[in-house]
Image (spheres, coloured by chain):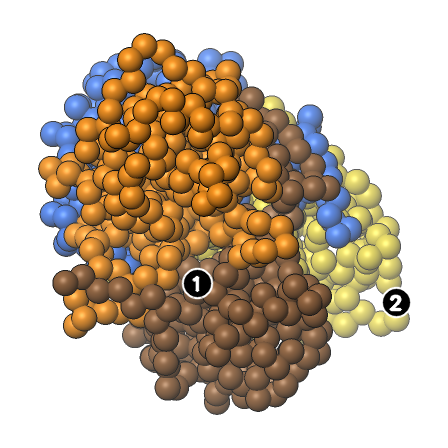
Chain colours: A blue, B brown, C orange, D yellow
Amino acid sequence: MNKVVAGPDEAVADVFENATLMLGGFGLSGIPENCISAILKKGTKGLTCISNNAGVDDFGIGLLLKTRQVKKMISSYVGENAEFERQLLSGELEVELIPQGTLAERVRAGGAGIPAFFTPAGVGTEVATGKEVREFEGKKYLLEHWLRADFAIVKAWRGDTAGNLIYKGTARNFNPMMAAAGKITIAEVEELVPLGALDPNQIHTPGIYVQRIFQGKNYEKRIEQRTVSK
Amino acid sequence: MNKVVAGPDEAVADVFENATLMLGGFGLSGIPENCISAILKKGTKGLTCISNNAGVDDFGIGLLLKTRQVKKMISSYVGENAEFERQLLSGELEVELIPQGTLAERVRAGGAGIPAFFTPAGVGTEVATGKEVREFEGKKYLLEHWLRADFAIVKAWRGDTAGNLIYKGTARNFNPMMAAAGKITIAEVEELVPLGALDPNQIHTPGIYVQRIFQGKNYEKRIEQRTVSK
Amino acid sequence: MLDKIGIAKRIAKEVKDGMYINLGIGIPTLVANYIPPQLSVVLQSENGLLGIGPFPKESEIDPDLINAGKQTITMMPGSALFNSAESFAMIRGGHVDLTILGAMEVSEQGDIANWKVPGKMVKGMGGAMDLVASAKHIIVAMQHCSKEGASKLLKKCTLPITGIKCVKRIVSDMAVLDVLPQGGFKLLERAPGVSVEQIKNATEGRLEIEGNIPEMQL
Amino acid sequence: MLDKIGIAKRIAKEVKDGMYINLGIGIPTLVANYIPPQLSVVLQSENGLLGIGPFPKESEIDPDLINAGKQTITMMPGSALFNSAESFAMIRGGHVDLTILGAMEVSEQGDIANWKVPGKMVKGMGGAMDLVASAKHIIVAMQHCSKEGASKLLKKCTLPITGIKCVKRIVSDMAVLDVLPQGGFKLLERAPGVSVEQIKNATEGRLEIEGNIPEMQL
């Protein structure tokens, strides 16, 4: 089963106006740099982006915010981005903030066919507004629903032609759950290898979740907080 | 953080009468052979065992059924065991049969702090008796609750002294979810290695879930259906 | 009338290139042997493997590598191993394209019974309830009648059911039939040497016969 | 009055051998520097790592290895990497023994506010709501008062809250206090050179003072 496409332009060619996208990554780590550039070039508008963060002013999803291609962000933390804050305060951008664990689990639920589940995060806060609250063994929980997307766009370290993926370090983050929750899942990888080159016991994302894969180029992997020890 | 115990006898020493145990494995693959033997020797009675299968007459959990140490089995499939069927039909053994995916997800929910979730498995069948049914996007789902245990007993291929585990082949099965759902989790491994010997990117069960670990002995790894191609 | 291998061969013709498929225990497992080799498909085993290969040679046997029927197996290049929760996430999430499983009874509404005979058999449902509740496309392999000649394609199942309104297509030893969205069996093909009349007599549920019914090509 | 490093040092004394700990951004991250080296503890980073090591040397920097504050880090021997769903499964499932995080306000009921200042700051809650809703033990690092001198240990939080009835212990620049199960702050220790009177004046919520209040040992 060969899922290889030529590159990011072909991979995102059918991303349509007002589509819902999931984009992997935590901060700028593990983000699909090549596909973000291709969507930027394509200029598709009205996007709803589900991603833990919103990039920085001049990198990651921040690039799509600048060009006003994003209608709505669904994230847990967006504090790294001044343009984001401006658009939000001016009402140009819709934003839904979700606790990080709830976001991760809602995406996982989307891929796993679980329409709703109970979680304690946000009980008694404004996140609970309008949500069912139920008590289990003396503790209160909120009912949260699955999240799915028209396109899930993920970044992995190594992948094979059948779409099996292995991530590296903490660049794994949201990528595996998102890979499972897209109607179409696009994976860009640093190294594309032949079938049989990956150890089946080490696969993080089984190929069944991935529809398109390509080897990306020129990864910048920008660092937000370069910290070193003496 | 050193979680190493001397062997199976020490590992299961505090397994008490009427305790709830989770036991990893699918069929006879990936079952904690050493700990089952130790519990057999110890003779603890009244156990509730949560395990996908119930072993065969003379191996796996079947051994504990023979000695009548098991009060209740919670499983998805128990068809390999004549003594089991006899005890069940005679009313000596309580049995709760759960769809395999629901069992896997209820155990995962137990480890993940999710008290309940919706799943489509069993809608309209006797499994749905007494359960809340709710419709999402035109499809019906059952509300299912988490499962947790006093002791989760798992078998891995390799493990380190901090309890990080790697499984092999399809012997992984229910072990990772159970490892997370035990108040006390005991891991027996074929090979116990020093801290730092396992690649952090390949860990299947992070050590945080494991309280005790030891290197097992004399693994029999019995095969139920030896099938070969010419 | 088809034997087990005949049923498996006929079902193999339903397989399309690029499919991810879950094969149940029994006849469905045999289907793997008859999938045209030019098709690229991936077989899922619900105990945690995508990419089931052929049975091993004696020297390749690995007790840590079995399928859902507990048979020793091998892996294909490009396989992936995972845990049982991930396996059923795949199934429940609709990522498996085709599920092929056996049945003791099917109703004209598409209900299926295959896990329990009260008072006689208590083996459990295994993964069947998850599979039938979630699969995009379900093909059932079954005998059209019991040994005593009673129809197993019924108005209503008499055995405890595994799932409701889920079966899309049936390949029996006598015929290929679809379950219609509004209920009823639509006869598509006859097994070699089996007449429409015989199928009519062997089907308790409502049977829709339109035009000439061709014989199966195996 | 303690500076940030003083608060971090005092919190480090709460750490016990064998603990799995999640450290929030800011002062809590500094705590790692002062955990006695004879204690064996594992630090969790909610973006998918157990076993955070020291910051890397220039030559070791890996952009694929960061903590929840997006700082470059290293791994300790025996580390494990995982995805965000697994990370919060750990947190939600009560497997993390201790959570240390910052706060803008804490109420005498143990409510905490640390994610939003309406009209001024919209950064999001990140993992804080999950952490405070699930942690077995929560220690808060905070300033006792605002720059304007207003108390941040309140009867009721004025800012949007992150979680209810969850804070167990507070280490501020002025004091160590417990939140009592029935509500109210119990004064345990004074910062060096800070009087009970000063703490009283700086605490809006109900303050319980019993006997002689010792000065912190750092």
Please name which of the two marks, 2 or 1, marks the residue nearer to the observer: 1
Checking the image for residue D196, the label placed there is: none
Mark 1 = which residue?
B26
Q: Quadrant of residue A19?
A: top left
Residue D215, compared with residue D126, is above or below; it is below
Decide: is C188 above or below C94: above
Q: Quadrant of residue C82?
A: bottom left
Residue C132 lies, with reference to residue B135, above or below; the image says: below
Disc 2 to disc 1: CB gap under 8 Å? no
Find the residue positioned furthest to the top.
C211
The residue identified by callout 2 is D210
Neighbours of disc 1 within 10 Å: few (<14), some (14-19), many (20+): many
Q: Is residue C30 visible?
A: yes
Q: How many numbered circles are shown?
A: 2
Q: Position of residue B150 (x, y in %)?
A: 64, 69
Q: Nearer the viewer, residue A167 or B227?
A: B227
Placement of the N terminus of chain A among the 4 image quadrants? top left
Give B125 or C158, whichever is nearer the viewer. C158
**As shown in the figure, which amino acid type bears the numbered disc 2?**
Glu
The residue located at (61%, 87%) in the rendering is B42
Q: CA distance from mark 2 to mark 1?
A: 58 Å
Mark 2 neighbour class, 10 Å CA radius: few under 14, some 14 to 19, many 20 or more: few
Identify the residue at image location x=70%, y=32%.
A132
* Residue D162 coordinates in the image, percent (x, y): 65, 41
For residue D161, say whether it is visible.
no
Residue D134 at x, y percent in the picture: 63, 52
